Amino acid sequence: MTGEQEFRGIESGPLFDRTWHIDRVEGAAVQGLKDTSVEPLSEPLIEVPDDLKGNLVVTSVDALVNWGRKSALWPVTFGLACCAFEMIATAMGRFDIARFGMEAFRASPRQADLMIIAGTVTWKMAPAIQRIHEQMAEPKWVISMGVCATSGGPYFGSYSVVPGVDHIIPVDVYVPGCPPRPDALLFGVMELHEKIKKYHNLRPGSRNVPGGTLAAENP
Amino acid sequence: MPIRTEPMTVNVGPQHPSTHGVFRLRITFDGEEILEVEPVFGYLHRGTEKLAEERNYVQVVTLTDRLDYVSSMINNQAYCLAVEQLLEVEPPDRGKYLRTIAAELQRIAAHLMGIGFFLQDLGTLGTPLMYCFRTREKILDLFEMLCGARITVSYLRPGGVFADAPEDFWPALDRFLTDLPGELSELEQLILENEIVMVRTRGVSTLPLDMAINSSVSGPVLRASGLAWDWRKAEPYDAYDRVEFDVPVAQNGDNYDRFWVRMQELHQSARIVRQCVEQIEPGPVRLDLPLVLRPEPGREAYGRVEASKGELAFYLFSDGGISPYRCKIRSPSLINLTVTEHLLVGWKLADMIVTLGSVDINMGEVDR
Amino acid sequence: MPFQALTGEALADRLAEAVPDSVERADGDCVWVEPSQIAITAQFLRDDPGLDFQFLNAISAVDFIDSFDVVYHLTSFRQQHKGVVKARLHGRESLSLPSVYEVWRGADLQEREVWDLMGIRFEGHPNMKRIMLWEGFDGHPLRKDYL
Ligand code: SF4
């Protein structure tokens, strides 16, 4: 232990030697996720507390709330790979995502309601994605941008790539392309808007199927 | 007696708006000051080298696009040069010029990204980045004319390029080259002499030359430390031996110099493109190679280019089969990060982000 | 002075004088060095004024089933030449090689990468952690027997 280290109150040894246990814990989490996430998840559903079920629904309230939600979807700043550059290009002057009220890319997931998975998802990254998705407040949506996030794409079959982000978090809209052009991403966003418009706020599991019949099948 | 504060180890990334992708650092801070750094890699490790062993020589080109995804053309170039070394062939002249044009346009686009995000990290909140993207979009339009894709181009192929440029490419390129100096000078007026940029970056995180060389640092980072070394000059490939250009070099190796070198290289790249447009002659653009290439067994090649981040090389080993037996990628972004610890320790938290921006890494290439 | 490639024989001649028993064999492109001698050889390659290999371009490893080649690509800016040095390791289990970390700091991340993906340990490297994959990953994916 050097004098400097002692004065500063640092434990002895270089930082990378002191972080072995963290690496092991994280590695075990990654491996566990890889071993258990073998099936894609189904489309997401909103859980509604039991005591709210059967409440009266006023459709114009739905329309207003949905309009509000769709008009200001704030994405979380989350670029993974090549597709991220098309996502950023979408946010820049030429394609101008601000037309959809979406230019406010939030650095904190807690302020965002849309997550654009732009790029290849690796198993090492998967726990972090799951964590960020959990940190976002309901209601939240996920767009899987590009074939990598959708199915592994050019890296399908690689030892370190998740074969589709829907193995770890539920996805609302898939945008194909490698990378999707900004126009394609905007189209995906518009599709998501359509989806949000069909949302009944107080009926269970009614995110896109009126009447919420899916809720019974997917507890 | 100096006041003792409690040091704290924090985690930065992998999801962090300023880590240029999915880079992660563990940092011990004492207040604002950085005491220790441990970079953690691998969040975008996609197994490119393994996948390359399962695809044939031409198919691997598509994987190289996705390494440093802001400079796909240059990645293609490095790989194609390596395959051509294996086969001992050379592309025809027109192909060489088209490659050089494509690579230099790509270098402009890539450097603009490096500069734009560096300034974004400094807190310029969008304006210079928008300027950079404006010019970059024009380049991407040119690429679309060449090959139909904006980012993942796969335009260069072993033995030349995929196809000749269409007729309307040349007037469009001409318009672009006419507009470029104006756009660059707008950007330069905005930032190059900007006082805040200077104060925040001059003398911060200096990298001495001997350390840079010993740590295998290359590209603009090396040139900012004072060595005028450019593989386009040292080992000219494609049409670089027929064009004139300067190698900008700075002396201090600080954040400002790294940024300044990139700014200067933009002009040199435009100069190279202009000369290529003048010199290019009609002719074939691609050698007539079989679709499935089979280099002789036991041969190896080290195809190297000066990419936007530094020395990018593909080390290929052939066993006579249709796919590379081994395809190792020498990635400049990863190796430039060898000096992370030296650059960051002793500086402040706010400088950390800027320094990472000035080294200009690309995670697709760091992790592969 | 044009940039040139040093042949393996030329390198072997210089090495044989300075570091006895270090050269295994040489051909037109590269020189094979006795694996246990690689760190001493590297020191000489860097410090000899005639060779002056200050810059380590890349460390690669190739799996040949019954042996592994570790390849060092080197460049000298002052002498304007480049050279290739290889070390051949036999067998597949518990392979190790002296680290050149002390000679070229640039070997740091590359040696870690070779360990992670190829499973060759470097003795004397301070931080032999996995770099690309996570702790607990089974095997070394770039080996030919990893499927
Ligand atoms: S889909 Fe294509 S462009 Fe997007 S991250 Fe994957 S490889 Fe890159």
Image (cartoon, coloured by chain):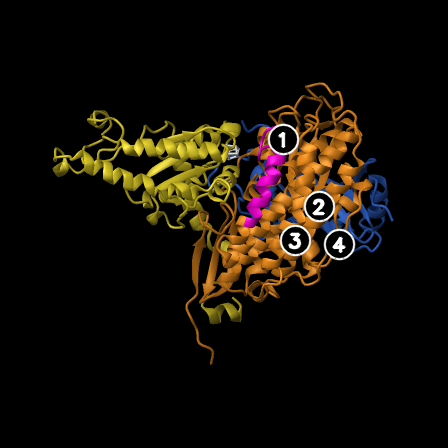
* Colour yellow maps to chain: A
Read off the chain for label 1: B
Same chain? Circles 1 and 2: yes
Image-quadrant location for residue B364: top right
Residue B145 shows which numbered tag? 1
Nearest the camera: A95 or A21?
Answer: A95
Extent of the magenta region: B131-153
Mark 3 residue CB less than 8 A from any atom of ligand 1: no
Residue under pointer 3:
B263
> Which mark is in front, 1 or 3?
1
Same chain? Circles 4 and 2: yes
Q: Is residue A119 above or below residue B227?
A: above
Read off the chain for label 3: B
Read off the chain for label 2: B
Amino acid type indicated by mark 3: Met
Residue B269 shows which numbered tag? 2
Amino acid type indicated by mark 4: Ala
Q: Earlier in the sequence, mark 3 or mark 4?
A: 4
Inter-mark Cα distance, 4 to 2: 16 Å
Inter-mark Cα distance, 1 to 4: 34 Å
- The percent position of residue C56, horizontal first and vertical second, equals 71, 48
